[in-house]
Amino acid sequence: MSAPSGSRRRWVAHTLFAASFVLVGLAVVVPGQPTAGASEGAPGAVTKSVTATRTFVDQNGNESEVTRKNVRMEVSQTADLRGRQEIHVAWDGAVPTGGVIGDPNASDGRNQEYPFVLLQCRGVDTSGKVPKGQARLTPESCWTQTSTERYLASGSHTPSWRFDAYADADDRRAVVGAPDPLPQACSTVSDPLSARWLPFRAAGGEVYYGGPDPTIGCSGLPPESDSAEAGGLPSNTTYGITGADGRGEADFAVWTSAENASLGCSASVSCSLVAVPVVGLSCDAYGTRLPAAAPQTTKDGVPLTDAQKAAADATCRRTGAYLPGEPRSSQTTDQAVRGNLWWSESNWRNRITVPLDFALTGSVCDVVSAEPPQKIMGSVVLNELTASWQPKFCTTDSLFTFTHVQQADALARTLVDSGEIEAAFSSAPKADGYRRPVVQAPAAVGGFAIAFNIDDANRQRRTTLQLNARLVAKLLTTSYPAMAVMRDNHPSIGANPLNITLDKEFQALNPGLPVSDNLEAAAALQIFSSSSDLIWALTSWIDADPEARAWLNGYADPWGMKVNAAYRDLDLPVDNWPLRDEFVAPQYYQNQNACYANSPTPFMQLIANPLSNLGAVLLNMQFASSSVATVCRYDGYDQTTLPLRQQGRQSIGYRFVLGVVPLSAARRYNLSTASLQTVSTVSPGTTFGDATGRTFVAPDAAGLKAATALLHPDEARHTWTFDYEALSTADGAGAYPGVLPVYAVVPTEGLEPKAATKLAKMLCYAGGEGQSPGAANGQLPAGYLPITEANGLRQQRDYTLTAAAAVRRQAGEVPALDAPVPDRGEVCDFRTPLAPSSTPSPSASATAPAPVTSGVPAPGPAVVVSAPPAGAPSVAPSAAGPPVVEAQTVLTAGQSSMFGAVGPYSLLVLAFLAALVGALMRWFDLIRAGLAGAASEARLMVQQRQQRREHAQRGDEP
Amino acid sequence: MSALLDPGPTTVLRVEAVDSSPPPGVDRERLRIGASQVLMGLSLVLVWALLYLFVLSGLEQAHAQSALYGRLRTELAEGTAPTGAPIALGSPVALISIPGAGVKDLVVVEGSRPTQLQDGPGHMLGSVLPGQQGVSVVAGHSLSFGGPFSRIDGLTRGSLIKVTTAQGSFAFEVLGVRTKGDPVPAALAAGAARLTLVTAGRGLGPAGDDVEVPDALKSGEPAARSVLDNLAASDSVFVDAELAAGVPAGPVATADPDAKLMTVSADTTTLALLALALQLLVGALVAFAWAWTRWSRPAAWIALGPGVLATLWLASSIGSRLLPGLV
């Protein structure tokens, strides 16, 4: 009896085991697809090559070629570029790099030997005439972040760069390119015998010389030169490392004028990616290539002696102090082959210039369009979509100008419902339903992603990561103590692993990652603090995951890790992650950390430190900045006001940051994204050592497409809801949990005809052309799933068209999700008016109450304005002209004062009473005596009067 | 002889305890006198407080106003009067005249905390300056400190409010008076400027009740009030006035979260200052008492009377900052 059931169980286990292998295999293979697709479909992938040579010229003028390299470079995308986008550059055939340092973007990379220097330069690289309105590309228009990358000084008369065989005679003088006159501050800093200045020419025409010490006023630097710590962007100048096989690769972030106005690249200002494969200086120490009348001299004009020339020849002919690939040690690198000579003619002439073509940005709309933009508020998930659509819309005559005001989805829904804005992008249904008739038309299917920037044990960037909902919940609830002070003192999380790298569960799912106990950033998941449906989707997934929910409810994980008590039994989903841990670090820690002691706040909130905007999270993910705000820098100011700072950039090779971002943003900024767990067949109580039995789904087209199958129509709310519960069943095994459809919420009653037409046009676009994927403006950027029949979203696409018709008609109808689909040609032809709907939708009247009218009529026109003393100003209606829907009247919020009402009276009465009682008490005897005397006197008088009367009567008688 | 021999009465030695206690009633007498002195002292203090609030604080504001007027006049002439944030708290920003409410050439100062409102009507941080496009809010006392805004709740639609700032003279037209529960006026048209005066209303009835506008107000004349009416100012009253074309607004400071107009607010600075002032007062009183006993009484009055008065005034002035700013 037991034998058959046991064998069946084993058979089931084997099948599941095999199935999990297949699924895990899929999960591993599938992430490769979008990148492969991207490199195929990316516009303007370019391959270029150059032959780079180095020659020495001897005393007699004989040339000898010492190096000849055929360098080939591939650039993944050169067209439709957007700000901060990373393009992939790969090269082969270059000289192997020596004296290697970890971070090729660091300024110190310039001192490597034979780096492959990548620069972004403004201008057109041509020997002929430069097109009108463009600049010529020269080293002076190439961006470097620091002045040391463009200023060289030497205490010698004969530094190698003076003997460049290909340089002009003028460029071989002792001091070249110095500002004239030299600022006083510069000569006091240093007065070198030889110096080479390479000023930076900004787009506006300013010239920044940089120089030895720009901080003390010796010439200036462009404002963007601020280090990343000061809030600026890190450098994109890359001193790429070529391996011993001559190959190398790098991701190059391109700047537009929005990121770097001094460089000033845009759709109209040409810029290029310039690769300078450093092969070393071509030497002409004896000046045989110089005109005979002008020999090289020292700074003071004394011709160089033969001995000096011989020394110069020796230094210039050096070929490197390091072996290929050898990391940098204390030994200095050879000047003649360093990266900081990228501008020297010997290296520069070998450059590969790849023109970059930037996409038009939304800023063009201010120029091309005079009409006020149609404002649409809401979802941050659509940021990349609207960045692509906005320039297309305003440059197309038949469309219109709009702006996407990124705002909390819940607020946008409320404002649409109250008539203060005309349209919103939002994902979640409105909690208490809409009181106005609105349609929720699917505009795009995006999602959230957990981005990471993690280096593996080999200090290479990791490309895959597997997370389950419980791990995400552990991070969000700040259940990792992060630091010893929390482990030893916190009441509820002391027994937990210090951070995620020490968590057995994480190690099981992601074997091979370095383990560290001083990595505070690995105890935090960077999220942004505003309300958004992005967080709502994330927390819905956590809430629906059985393991995560049980863990949040207080059940320990198989290794005994427990939830932070402050978050126990947390109600999910939420659209704004609450900060609940209130534990303040003990006094001894405050004594160590003066900044913390200045304002002791709940410590785990500093570890979590949600950022105020999404852009900051993205920047931190792209450049691996930790937002953990526990750092105290004693930087010289008043110790009592030192603030806590964020940890900032992590060094290359030791990066570990995790963050929640929209999927589309992750794609735009080339962020690695984690695969998320759906189904687990593993018994919940047992520990596990690998990912067996768990299904992880990557955020790619396949995962999103599978997820759309779990979108179920919700007829009552006229929208589709994602079935999070199904994720933990076999039905949802392949569905990416982060999928998040975004709807355009537009009223179908009360809009001005002009606004209604515009919004209907947008819906027509969203249901048609807008769903064709691509990088160009107006297309659907990477990270969104096209709403097409092929992706199982036919119903959604049709409903967008139905909604467009309803918005155009403004008849107050809310079409059912399965309403008959109107003819696209008719609905989206805006030259002819749309006929009224022939078959009224069955649910039209059900949820279409009269528009909200104000309860109390206000004197004068009834439009909302905030009471100045009452509170924050509300959003004024955007459209010109009076809005049709009356908004609620705001009533004056008066205040009253108890003191004002009764104070003076009571003071007066109290004063009077006190005086009266005091006087009575003081002169009690006197008053009593007086009263007694008066009384007896009165009695006497009465008696006398009586006696007188009696007397008179008696006198009358006789 | 016998008389000589007759022994006198013998001295009797009493052995029982002698009652040497003071006569009964003296203790009670002392307590009574002491209590009466305390009560009369309290009464004097209260009378002083009322005197300060209703008379002396008015003198104080008049004094501050005359200095501020001189300063603003100079700044207007030199063109250095402020047009936007940042403006130092308490510095003059505008000159306001409300003929319908008996206000003539009052200097509006920056800030609406009690400290600033002691010097005159205060421009509320976070609103634009009067005359600039947008909503400007000016708060003022209605009862104490001369009650500069004591009669603004009697203004009627169309009354004139004249404001002079560095950007020119503006004639605002009053829209109406509103109290708690009344609708806030409509949104401003583009380019328009609004001036909202805030004070504690007098004689409009307690909060929450239906507001009955006295007939006198409707007819446009200031209401004739009884003496007792003059002692109450309980609910905030807003007077809105508009100008069709304002001048462009300068930078606006952020709103001051601690400027509580109608609640008793005890901030630590005021309390500390008050403690210092009270120490001074006690010191002056001690010196007065010493002089009273050691010198002659006239000498004590002449030498230390003014000192006591001055410290008392100082303590009252600082102490009144703890009271609601609009009363």
Image: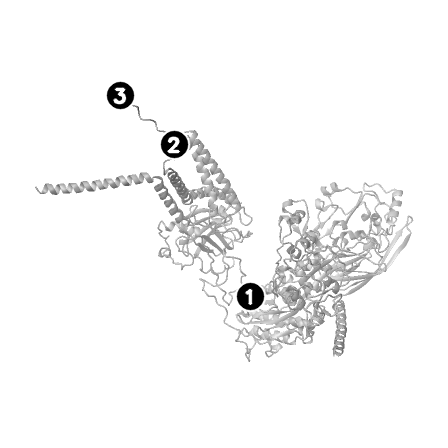
Q: Which residue is mark 2?
A: B15
Q: Which residue is mark 3?
A: B2
Inter-mark Cα distance, 2 to 3: 33 Å
Q: Are marks 2 and 3 in one subunit? A: yes
Give me the residue at 40% from left, 31% from top: B297
Local SS, label 1: helix
Report the side of A804 relative to A792 (left or right). left
Quick one: label 2 or label 3, which is nearer the N terminus? 3
Q: Position of residue A1 (x, y in %)?
A: 74, 79
The residue furthest top is B1
Q: Quadrant of the C terminus of chain A?
A: top left
Q: Nearer the viewer, residue A951 or B77?
A: A951
Local SS, label 2: loop
Neighbor class of circle 1 (other Cα within 10 Å; few <14, some 14-19, many 20+) is some
- Quarter of the rendering containing residue B307: top left
Q: Is residue A820 visible?
A: yes
Inter-mark Cα distance, 3 to 1: 128 Å
Local SS, label 3: helix
| Chain ID, mark 2 | B
Q: Are marks 2 and 1 in one subunit? A: no
**Label annotation for residue A414:** 1
Inter-mark Cα distance, 2 to 1: 100 Å
Q: Position of residue A775 (x, y in %)?
A: 70, 67
Q: Amino acid at mark 2?
A: Val
Q: Amino acid at mark 1?
A: Thr
| Up-down relation of residue B257 to residue A705 (above or below) | above
| Up-down relation of residue A539 to residue A939 (above or below) | below
